[in-house]
């Protein structure tokens, strides 16, 4: 019984860890896209197209 509980806890922890990792990777990509848009807009303004 203890072994089953330990295995269930390990599975839950692994799932939570992997989900958090994917979430952070997605958030990083979103932030990167926003940064690219800001950079593009700043370049446009620098060129006088603002």
Image: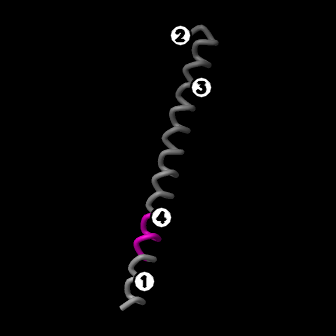
- Local crowd at mark 2 within 10 Å, few (<14), some, or many (≥20)? few
Residues at marks 2 and 1 touching, judged by CB atoms closer than 8 Å: no
Q: CA distance from mark 3 to mark 2?
A: 13 Å
- Measured from the top left, where is residue 27 in percent x and y? 48, 45
Q: Of circles 1 and 3, which is in front? A: 1
Q: Is residue 11 left or right of residue 50?
A: left
Please name the residue that numbered disc 4 is placed on: 18
Tell me which segment is drawn in magenta: 11-18
Q: CA distance from mark 1 to mark 4?
A: 16 Å
Q: Earlier in the sequence, mark 2 or mark 1?
A: 1
Residue 19 lies in quadrant: bottom left
Q: Secondary structure at mark 1?
A: helix
Q: Residue at x 58, y 12 (%)?
A: 45
Residue 47 lies in quadrant: top right
Please name the residue that numbered disc 1 is placed on: 7
Residues at marks 3 and 2 touching, judged by CB atoms closer than 8 Å: no
Q: Earlier in the sequence, mark 1 or mark 4?
A: 1
Q: Main secondary structure of the magenta part?
A: helix
**In the image, residue 6 above or below residue 27:** below
Q: Earlier in the sequence, mark 4 or mark 2?
A: 4
Please name the residue that numbered disc 3 is placed on: 39
Q: CA distance from mark 3 to mark 4?
A: 32 Å
Q: CA distance from mark 2 to mark 1?
A: 59 Å
Q: CA distance from mark 4 to mark 2?
A: 43 Å
Q: Residue at x 53, y 10 (%)?
A: 50
Residues at marks 4 and 2 touching, judged by CB atoms closer than 8 Å: no
Q: Of circles 1 and 4, which is in front? A: 1
Q: Is residue 16 left or right of residue 48?
A: left
- Local crowd at mark 4 within 10 Å, few (<14), some, or many (≥20)? few
- The total of numbered circles placed on residues is 4
Q: Secondary structure at mark 3?
A: helix
Please name the residue that numbered disc 2 is placed on: 50
């Amino acid at each position: 019984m203890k072994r089953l509980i330990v295995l269930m806890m390990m599975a839950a922890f692994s799932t939570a860890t992997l989900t958090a990792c994917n979430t952070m990777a997605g958030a990083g990509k979103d932030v990167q896209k926003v940064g690219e848009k800001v950079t593009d807009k700043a370049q446009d303004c620098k060129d006088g197209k603002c």
